[in-house]
Amino acid sequence: MTLTVTTDPSAIDSVLTRLLDADPVRATVIGSIVVDLRAGRAPDAWCAGRPGTDAVVVRSHRAYPVLFTAGWDGADLAEAIELVGRLPGLTGVSGPAEIAEAAAGRLAGERATERMGMRLFRLDDLVPPTGVPGEGRPANDDEHDLVLDWYRAFGAEAGGAMHDIEQAAANALASGRIWLWLDGGRPVSLAARRAPEAGSARIGPVYTPPEHRGHGYGSAVTAAATRDVLDLGAIPVLFTDLANPTSNKIYQLLGYYPVEDRAVVRFD
């Protein structure tokens, strides 16, 4: 074998931090894994890579698809896929579209798969929407139940893309990272931001209940969360579902522009 494999959290942290520091925008998901590693929330920590390159495949929790970075090709990719196939409880793969699809083709077998095309965006200059009634503000502790309900609703619409929704909502609320848009004093939309990691911070989830859609609330609350990131001196980034033309359009109107496309393939 030419690849290095480790389950040592500190060794994985070292590998991932190097990638994160080199490109905090493209490595935004890697930044989240680093946070989980350091907080002891990576029970299935595992990593394989080609020494001296950016070709890495990593898993923090079996609830999440294994993440491939770019840079894999040829025999090394075949070897990496073989190693991933030995992992217990494999639930899917993600990464650059061509790599993720190649891995899924080898690993899914007879299992049903669910594919999602994702696009990574970044923003340099914010263009706030105009004419949206209401105002944005950070959520407070009294709104815990509302935030949790909307996180759950987002998770259901996203096909279970979030793990441990209750804890994720509580952590974001406790650290002041959830923004609400209010119209007439009533919350109508939500956007969360992650803490900056190596100079970038990811926006998401963004959720507007069906009865409040079509009024620009999602754009407005995303702009509020984005401004929060910019005020911290970080680069805002986010992912969209390529099958959702509305979200791809509204984020670009705010000033987000595409960086690269990825795929997530989940195994049944």
Image: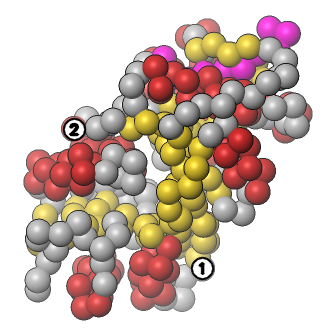
The image shows residue 62, relative to residue 144, as above or below, that is below
Residue that numbered label 2 is attached to:
38
- Location of residue 149 in the rendering, given as x and y in whole percent from the top left corner: 68, 30
Assign the magenta stretch its main secondary structure.
Answer: strand
| Vertical position of residue 218 compared to residue 42: above or below | above
Does the stretch in magenta take in 178? Answer: yes
| Residue drawn at 85 percent across, 10 percent down | 184
Is 15 above or below relative to 190? below
Q: Write the residue at 58% across / 76% down.
A: 113
Q: Is residue 37 left or right of residue 236?
A: left
Q: Upstream in the sequence, badge 2 or badge 1?
A: 2
On the question of residue 49 being in view, the answer is: yes
State the extent of the magenta-drawn residues as a range: 176-185
Question: What residue is rendered at 66% in x and 31% in y?
Answer: 127
Estimate how packed mark 1 is, as few (under 14), some (14 to 19) or many (20 or more) residues with alpha carbons within 10 Å.
Answer: few
Q: Is residue 149 visible?
A: no
Q: CA distance from mark 2 to mark 1?
A: 34 Å
Q: Who's the residue at 50% across and 31% down the image?
A: 193
Q: Is residue 194 magenta?
A: no
Report which residue position mark 1 lands on: 112
Q: Residues within 10 Å of mark 2 (few under 14, many from 20)?
A: few
Q: Secondary structure at mark 1?
A: loop
